[in-house]
Amino acid sequence: MKFKHTFHVFVDNFSVTYKQMLYRLVILIVALAISWGCITPFITVFINSEALNSLLSGVHNFIVELLQGDVMELKAISVRVAEAYEQVLHLLNTRIVQLVLTGLLLLAVLLVEKWFTGLGNYTTAVIINDKMALRKSSPFFQTLISHFKEAALYNLIYVPLSMLFDLAIAAAMIVILFFILHGIGYLFVSLFLFTLIMILAIAVKMTFTCDWLPALIRGKMGQKRAMLYSFDRKGKHTVGIYSNFVILELIILALNVMALFFTFGVGLLVTLPASYVALICYEMVNYYDTMDLKYFLDKYTIIKPEKERVITREQFFKGYDPDDSQ
C-alpha cells in the first residue's frame, strides 16, 4: 500500500518537480563555474607543460605506428613514452601541495553544493506535507525563505554525515574493484557488484534517515530528537522499509538510465529532480502511516488510520488536534 500511496502523493505533487529542476540547475551551474575556477590553475600547468605534450605525442605516434604495422619503431617510441610519463609524474610530485589544495577546494564546493540542494529537499518536503495534511499549495521559493533557518540547521548536520558515509562506501568499492576483482578481469562482474553495493549501501542510509525530515516537519520535533527518532528503528518494520528503498532505487536507476540513453540526457532534467521528489513522498507517506495520521492522497481521497484517536469534550473545545500529539 505504501508504494500505491506514494505514487498518488507523487502525482498530486508533481508540479514541485519543475521547481526542483530549476533550483537544482541554478545550484549546479554555479557549483560547476566555481569548480572550474578552482581547477583551472592546476590544469593549465599540465596542459602547457612539455612533459605532457611529449607524452600525448608519443602515445599518438605509438598508435599510428601500431595501426600501420610498422613494429620496428614501436620499441623506440615506447621508450620515449615511458620517459615522458616519468617526467609527468615528476611534475605532479612537484605540485603535490597545489594538488591537495585543489582537492580540498573541490571538496568544499561539493559540501556547499549539497547543502544548498538539501535546502531544496527540505522545502520540497514542507510543500508535500502541506498538501498531504491541509491541501495547501505552498509556493516553492517563499517556503524556502520562511523555513530557511530550520532547513539550514538540518543540512548542516545531515550533509556532512551523508558525505562521510558516501566516501566510506566509495572507498570500499574502490578496494573491491581495483584489488579484489582486478584478477578476475570480467567487466560485467565488476559493474554488477559496483551497482549492487551502491544500491544496498544507499538503501541503508535512507532507511536510517527516512524519518528525520518528516519528524522535523510533520512531527514538529527538534533537530536532536528528530535525528534520534529516525535512527531508532524499534517497531518501525525496518526490513520492509529497507526492501522498499531497494525497489525504489532500482526503479529510479532504470528510469534515469533510460532517460540518459534514449533521450541523450535531456530526460534527466526531469527524471533526476523527480527521483528526489518521489523519495521524499515515500518518506512522508511512511511517517504518516507509522504514526497513524490522516492525510490526503489527492483532492478527493483521505487516508485514515484504522483506529481514530478519541478526544474528550474538553480537549475538543480547547482545539486539541490528536494528530499533533505525536
Image: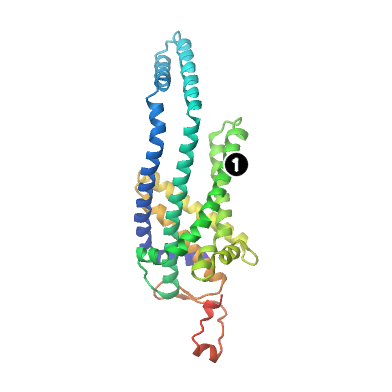
Q: Position of residue 101 (x, y in %)?
A: 48, 37
Residue 39 sits above or below residue 280 on the image: above
Q: Residue 138 vs residue 180: left or right?
A: left
Q: Amino acid at mark 1?
A: Ala
Q: How many marks?
A: 1
Residue drawn at x 56%, y 33% is 186
Q: Position of residue 182 (x, y in %)?
A: 59, 31
Q: Which corner quadrant of the image does residue 125 belong to?
A: bottom left
Q: Which corner quadrant of the image does residue 72 belong to?
A: top left
Q: Is residue 162 visible?
A: yes
Q: Residues within 10 Å of mark 1 (few under 14, many from 20)?
A: few
Quadrant for the C terminus, please: bottom right
* Residue furthest out toward the bottom: 313
Residue drawn at x 54%, y 91% is 314
SS assignment at label 1: helix
- Which residue in the protein does label 1 denote? 172
